[in-house]
Image: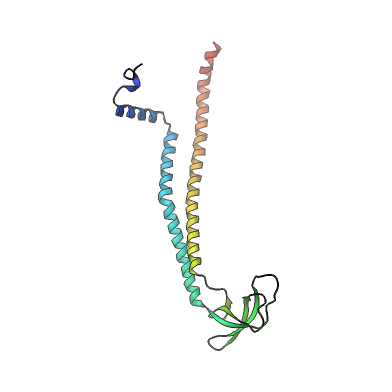
Amino acid sequence: MSAQGSPYASGPPSERGDRASKDAKSLSRMSDRFESWFRRVLMVVLVLGLPAAAVSAGLTAYKASMRTVRTQAAERHQVNARLTAGAKSDDDWAKRPAQVRWTDTDGVVRTGAALVKPGTPEGATVRVWVTREGTVTSPPTSTLNATTSGWMVGGMAAFGVAAGSYAAWAGMRLVLDRRRYAQWGAEWDQVEPQWSARFRR
């Protein structure tokens, strides 16, 4: 049969494409159309929501960390202190607490426990961080910590949006597939007796 005589070749190409599109739409079920629409919504969420959530959460965490950095930098300062007892030396490289003494800006002699390297002798001078009240404390948070915190929180937010979108898609597919299988089973229960009766004649 020639292409001209074929019923599928009748009409211009644009009309054949429109007819095929209409046939495909007529064969699609409501669940298929809903699934297609839901995928588009999730794609929009991923394209727009993921970077927005990551940037917003990252900047919020960074700004909060920077406030902590500025607060600690204003409240803590370093002083020269002397060990009142030597730190024991062993094979462990971890710092250990030792008693230190220093004189603050008001001339008051203060004491406290600071982490020093093992084997530091008594009377050695060490640099320690203290608060305005004269309490030995840890070094203030650095801007690197704030930047790292921002990136980590932003990354977790992006991962959360991606994981949530995937979970929503997987849950939607599970519900729709169960409904489709139930519908197929009901249709087969109606059609199977008529179809199998042909072979019993």
Quadrant (top left, top right, bottom left, bottom right) of the C terminus: top right
Which of the pair 115/171 is nearer the observer?
115
How many marks the image carries: the answer is 0
Task: Residue lying at the far top in this picture: please name it.
Answer: 201
Residue at horizontal 44 percent and vertical 52 percent from the top:
50
Q: Quadrant of residue 114?
A: bottom right
Quadrant (top left, top right, bottom left, bottom right) of the N terminus: top left
Residue at horizontal 57 percent and vertical 88 percent from the top:
108
Q: Is residue 130 left or right of residue 117?
A: left
Residue 80 spot, x, y in % from top left: 57, 82
Image position of 72 with respect to 9: above or below = below
Q: Quadrant of residue 55?
A: bottom left
Q: Does the rendering let one see residue 133?
A: no
Q: Quadrant of residue 121?
A: bottom right
Q: Does the rendering let one see residue 148?
A: yes
Residue 33 spot, x, y in % from top left: 41, 35
Residue 177 spot, x, y in % from top left: 51, 35
Image position of 73 with respect to 41: above or below = below
Residue 169 spot, x, y in % from top left: 48, 42
Task: Residue lying at the far bottom in this picture: please name it.
Answer: 107
Residue at horizontal 53 percent and vertical 20 percent from the top:
192
Colouring scheme applied when the structure was drawn: rainbow
Which of the pair 94/183 is nearer the observer?
94
Image position of 150 with respect to 112: above or below = above
Residue at horizontal 51 percent and vertical 22 percent from the top:
190
